[in-house]
Image: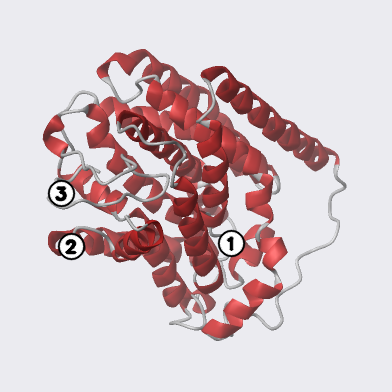
Amino acid sequence: MVEPAPAPRLPLPGTAVADGPESVPAQSGSARLGALDVLRGIAILGTLGTNIWIFTNSEGLLGYVAHSDEPQGAWLWAERILQQLAQGKFLGLLTIMFGIGLAIQQRSAVRAGRAWPGRYPVRAGLLLLDGLVNFFFVAEFDVLMGYAITGLVVAFILATGPKAQRRWLITTASIHVTMLSLIAVAILFAPGGAGGHRPLDPNPYADGSFWDLVAFRWQHLLAFRLEPLFIFPMSIALFLLGARLFRAGIFEAEGARIRKRLMVIGFGLAAPIDLLLGLLGGDLILVARYGTAPIVSLGLLALVAEVYAHRPGPGWVGRRFSEVGRMALSCYILQNLVSGWLCYGWGLGLAGLVSANARVPFTAGIYVLVCALMLSFAHFWLRRFERGPVEWLWNRSYRALTRG
């Protein structure tokens, strides 16, 4: 982590800078130390840029996927543009950051003479438990369970040689591209006008209690967990790519050529195609979310790394993002919980009060509000405590299980 810590602390599973009690102070001057937590903070708040549209849809995730109750005219295009700016990019960035975290933990373990993956399965198990709690009680689009399983697999892959890791990366990426290509072909040749969206009746998002929504997630467990299964090969590939980029020096001054290439590919090639697919709408958004968006994520990674390759540490804005990054798990869960309370029927139920044409400014307002709350929460919490609340609980649980 970037903050100086007088006492030993354990990092988040898959996102930390070290797999042990040591802490690296920010004043070391390394470019990556200024960028890692900033990138995690950007990724956490960025994922909310996609998820917030789920909360502000009166039918939650199901209504969002079905594009139910879309606005008309200019508001429709405004919604599509805003959604596409975040769609899949920050999920990809967060996935890559987990891979970078694993590479750093492995390097730390090797330098300290510890076996790898060592105790990492315990970390993965705790993250899986966090994901289960988050899925049932907070958000059915949880990514933590998928990251826990992916991280466990990749931890063992990283224990192999460079050639084996490269084969794993190529194989999993190829599997994902093949599946995505088949989906794209099916979309192009599928007959139009088949079926339609059935409104939820009863609607647990707008009318149900907190426990009604918990029960709804349990009843549709398999359907809500299809995405992590589908993107499992992609997640492995992005984890491994993140580890590979870290080892190649993307955060160091010598990595300028890598950063430049990634920005050209991500922003110059992938981003225009990604935006076009989003504007076309419909099922083509799947191709953008899982095809072009992860490539744009590489451009985002390279851009932030480039900024911090030429400065000793984060400025005022960077420090605010880094604080969210240091409390990534707490902020990820809390931002979804707060959004649910604002929008769902078990809370204030604001989503059910907004018309389709008013949803764009309403969603933008809710997003800015929740981001401001997360930035403030992280700032004031870390002024008093070393870790976020969920990170503290995770740390205590890890030490209890490993007797560390």
In the image, is residue 147 above or below residue 338?
A: above
For label 3, the SS is loop
Q: Residue under label 3, please give it.
A: 5
Disc ID at residue 385: 2
Mark toward the start of the polypeptide (1 vs 3): 3
Looking at the picture, tell me which residue is in the foreground, 263 or 110: 110
Residue occupying the point 24% across, 64% down: 377
Measure the C-alpha gap from mark 3 to mark 2: 11 Å
Asked if the residue at tag 3 contacts the one at tag 1, i.e. Cβ–Cβ closer than 8 Å, the answer is: no
Q: Quadrant of the N terminus?
A: top left
Residue occupying the point 64% across, 44% down: 231
> Residue 171 vs residue 113: left or right?
right
The three-letter amino acid code for the residue at tag 3 is Ala
Near mark 1 (Cα within 10 A), the count class, few <14, some 14-19 or many ≥20, is some
The three-letter amino acid code for the residue at tag 2 is Phe
Q: Which mark is in front, 2 or 1?
A: 2
> Residue 84 vs residue 385: left or right?
right
Measure the C-alpha gap from mark 2 to mark 1: 44 Å
Q: Residue under label 1, please give it.
A: 71
Disc ID at residue 360: none
For label 2, the SS is loop
> Residue 379 vs residue 299: left or right?
left
In the image, is residue 110 above or below residue 344?
A: above
Query: Is residue 219 something one can see in this rendering?
Result: yes
Q: How is the image coloured?
A: secondary structure
Mark toward the start of the polypeptide (3 vs 2): 3
Near mark 3 (Cα within 10 A), the count class, few <14, some 14-19 or many ≥20, is some
Q: Which mark is in front, 1 or 3?
A: 3
Residue occupying the point 49% across, 46% down: 91
Mark toward the start of the polypeptide (2 vs 1): 1
